[in-house]
Amino acid sequence: MQKQSIQRKIIETKGSYYINIPKQVATNLQLKKGEQVAIYPNSNGFLVGLLTVYSIGYEKRTIEELLSILKQHKITQVIDVRERAFSRVPAYRKAKLEKALQDSGIFYYNLNQLGAPSSLRKALNKGINYNEFFHKYKEHLTLHYQEYELLKKVISTAPTVLLCYERDPEFCHRSVITSELKRDGYHIVHL
């Protein structure tokens, strides 16, 4: 079944342009009054998506606690930003995590290219400081620009959380990712 387009006139007011979004469309997209949205040009026109991105670490959390937090924030998509979707905690290994999320109606997406490389994590364990770790990770992120752009496109499709191990984002490479997203206009919420 083909989706019908909704036509709207662009209105100019005080030098800015506005488009009226029908309430049913806003409801289907889970948009709320006052919420910011991202508008991305693409080959077919524009893609409109949510602008808030969540971040979470599963350290010292049961899978039940994680799922509860995700449901509380109405998150429907998890992007795993670990280089290796493996954990000493079996519930957070890729297959089991994906199944638990799927059973809860949450989509799982793995973007392992955005994970901190093992060589960099090993250097951190051997004593480089976090400033150097984050600086080197930012260089890594620059090399993976296409994956970062893919991340932004995936984020625009549903309420999304970036997942890694560290509970405190200040000790996790996802803080570099979220800093870049913030620079690009996203609102970041660490859970």
Image (tube, rainbow, N blue to C red):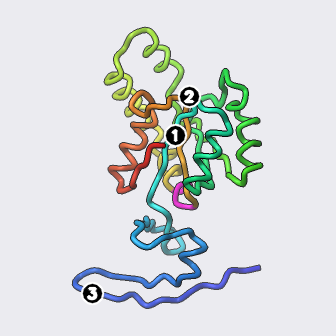
Q: Residue at x 54, y 47 (%)?
A: 161
- Residue 37 included in the magenta stretch of the image: no
User: For the point 41% across and 37% down, which residue is it?
Assistant: 175
Which residue is label 1 attached to?
A: 56
Q: At numbered mark 2, what does the secondary structure look like: helix, strand or loop? A: loop
Identify the residue at horizontal 67%, vertical 47% (top origin). 108
Q: How crowded is mark 3: few (under 14 residues within 10 Å), some or many (20 or more)?
A: few
Q: Position of residue 42 (x, y in %)?
A: 49, 67
Q: Distance between the residues labelled 2 and 3?
A: 48 Å
Lower sequence index among marks 3 and 1: 3
**What's the amino acid at mark 2?**
Glu
Can residue 154 be found in the magenta stretch? Answer: yes
Question: Which residue range is magenta in the image?
Answer: 153-157
Q: Do the residues labelled 3 and 1 touch (CB within 8 Å)?
A: no
Q: Where is residue 11 in the image (x, y as percent from the top left)?
A: 35, 89
Q: Which quadrant of the rendered structure holds the N terminus? A: bottom right
Is tag 2's residue or tag 3's residue first in the polypeptide sequence? 3
Amino acid type of the residue tagged 3 in the rendering: Thr
Residue, disc 3: 13
**101 to 89, vertically: above or below:** below
171 to 2, vertically: above or below: above
Q: Is mark 1 on a helix, strand or loop?
A: strand
Compute the Cα span from label 3 to label 1. 39 Å
What label sits on residue 164 in the rendered view? none
Q: Do the residues labelled 2 and 1 touch (CB within 8 Å)?
A: no
Residue placed most toward the observer, 114 or 65: 65
